[in-house]
């Protein structure tokens, strides 16, 4: 029986590895979509918006799309399989580029916001790539599968900003119009890649099995995982979305801004080559804690100066912190559910993360416009402290539960 189980795990991991390759490639191409939006959104918004304080609304609409798409993505995956959800998402990505280009050419702020909202829907589907990579994999391979798919974002960090740099002036004076057109083509290439992912339609038994969602999400482990995700991603997003416009307000060039975003994205995904191994060695809670501390450190750098080097250092450290905290939190989520519960639990977790991002994003433009870059960085510290406290409490509760279980089974040995 042990030999059969081991053989099944080897076969499952072999299929998971094949999917990881495709999903990592799709992550790279999908990441280029978000890179284009984050590198250009606040700048285009400042050009098209009726008021400067609305400049970051297109980026907020992207985050709203992320939140709005999470539960439908889970429902489609649960009913028709992940592959269909992925294909639909890449189709929305192509539409994002076409509509974004049209909006810039016709100076329509509303249409540009709609385009970034669709980009957020595409991004919400792509967020499930990391969980999809772990489907069917052995417990030992799951953190590595999540990490390797996220590593695909390294190439997005190179491709997206360079795509903007090479194309932003092709249709001058319509800055970035051609960039969005090329982004649509990149999304179509991603569609061809995800169409080949080997993920069968869920079995009928999986559609109605598992524990109630409320039972799962009230576990201390899930609460800690979700809260840390809710803190790590929105805080990173707050600083990242404000940075390009803050750099412009400080007199820095578009090239400086593109360079900062490029290396921020590389820093977000580059550590993924070894984050999974770190989680396997030290445990997810310690990696999450390290990530949150790095995000706080990035905010400290942001408070120390406004030169290009300060902005670049802030964005790079912020990216590494996000990688540790978000991948670690995702690994924690995987520990809280059974296979038949995965779609609803993962979708709910992402809904919490991106729903909070959506709420926070609408304040980022006002925060930057009214209080400045320093205020943006100051906001990071209180949530990080909260996340570290809840993570510590959840880890203590888990150790206590294990100790109680051991005492119940071997009372004379304690």
Image (cartoon, rainbow, N blue to C red):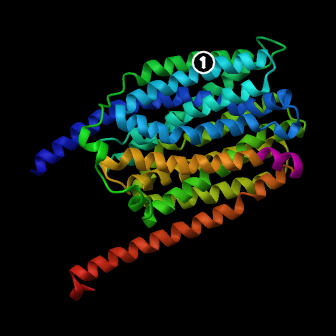
Q: Is residue 365 magenta?
A: yes
Q: How many labels does the image show?
A: 1
Asked which quadrant contains residue 197, the reply is: top left
Specify few, some or many for label 1: CA neighbours under 10 Å numbering under 14, 14-19, or 20 or more: many
Q: Residue furthest top?
A: 171
SS at mark 1 in the image: helix
**Region in magenta:** 364-371
Residue found 77% across the figure and 38% down from its top: 56
Quarter occupied by the C terminus? bottom left
Give x and y (percent) for residue 206: 28, 43
Residue found 74% across the figure and 29% down from its top: 40
Q: Is 174 drawn above or below residue 117 in the view shown?
A: above
Residue 355 shows in the view: yes
Residue found 17% across the figure and 46% down from its top: 6
Give x and y (percent) for residue 144: 40, 45
Give x and y (percent) for residue 283: 43, 60
Q: What residue is shown with label 1? A: 184
Left or right position of 248 against 335: right
Left or right position of 171 against 219: right
Residue found 57% across the figure and 40% down from its top: 68
Q: Nearer the viewer, residue 338 or 43?
A: 338
Q: Residue furthest left?
A: 1
Residue 167 shows in the view: no
Q: Is 314 drawn above or below residue 92 in the view shown?
A: below
Give x and y (percent) for residue 28: 53, 29
Dominant secondary structure, magenta? helix
């Amino acid at each position: 029986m042990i030999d059969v189980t081991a053989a099944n795990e080897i076969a499952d991991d072999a299929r998971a590895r094949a999917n990881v390759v495709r999903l990592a490639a799709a992550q790279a191409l999908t990441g280029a979509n978000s890179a284009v939006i984050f590198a250009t959104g606040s700048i285009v918004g400042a050009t098209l918006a009726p008021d400067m304080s609305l400049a970051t609304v297109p980026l907020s609409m992207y985050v709203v799309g992320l939140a709005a798409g999470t539960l439908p993505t889970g429902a489609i995956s649960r009913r028709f399989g992940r592959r269909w959800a992925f294909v639909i998402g890449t189709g929305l990505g192509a539409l994002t580029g076409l509509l974004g280009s049209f909006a810039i050419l016709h100076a329509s702020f509303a249409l540009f916001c709609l385009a970034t909202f669709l980009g957020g829907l595409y991004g919400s589907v792509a967020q499930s790539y990391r969980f999809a990579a772990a489907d069917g994999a052995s417990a030992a391979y799951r953190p590595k599968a999540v990490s390797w798919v996220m590593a695909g974002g390294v190439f997005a960090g190179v491709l997206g900003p360079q795509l903007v740099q090479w194309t932003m002036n092709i249709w001058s004076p319509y800055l970035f119009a051609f960039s969005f057109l090329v982004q649509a083509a990149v999304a179509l290439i991603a569609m061809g890649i995800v169409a080949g992912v080997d993920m069968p339609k869920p079995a009928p038994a999986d559609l109605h099995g598992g524990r109630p969602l409320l039972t799962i999400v009230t576990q201390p482990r899930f609460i800690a995982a979700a809260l840390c995700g809710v803190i790590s991603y929105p805080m990173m997003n707050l600083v990242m979305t404000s940075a390009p416009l803050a750099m412009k307000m400080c007199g820095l060039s578009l090239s400086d801004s593109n360079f900062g975003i490029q290396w921020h994205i590389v820093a977000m995904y580059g550590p993924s080559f070894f984050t999974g191994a770190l989680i396997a060695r030290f445990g997810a809670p310690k990696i999450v804690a390290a990530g949150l501390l790095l995000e706080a450190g990035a905010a400290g750098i942001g408070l120390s100066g406004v030169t290009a080097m300060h902005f670049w250092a802030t964005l790079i450290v912020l990216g590494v912190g996000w990688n540790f905290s978000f991948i670690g939190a995702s690994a924690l989520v995987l520990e809280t559910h059974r296979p038949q519960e995965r779609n609803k639990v993962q979708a709910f977790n992402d809904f919490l993360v991106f729903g909070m991002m959506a709420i926070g994003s609408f304040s980022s433009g006002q925060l930057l416009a009214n209080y400045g870059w320093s205020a943006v960085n100051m906001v990071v510290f209180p949530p990080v402290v909260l996340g570290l406290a809840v993570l510590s409490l959840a880890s203590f509760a888990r150790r206590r539960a294990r100790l109680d279980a051991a005492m119940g089974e071997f009372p004379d040995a304690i």
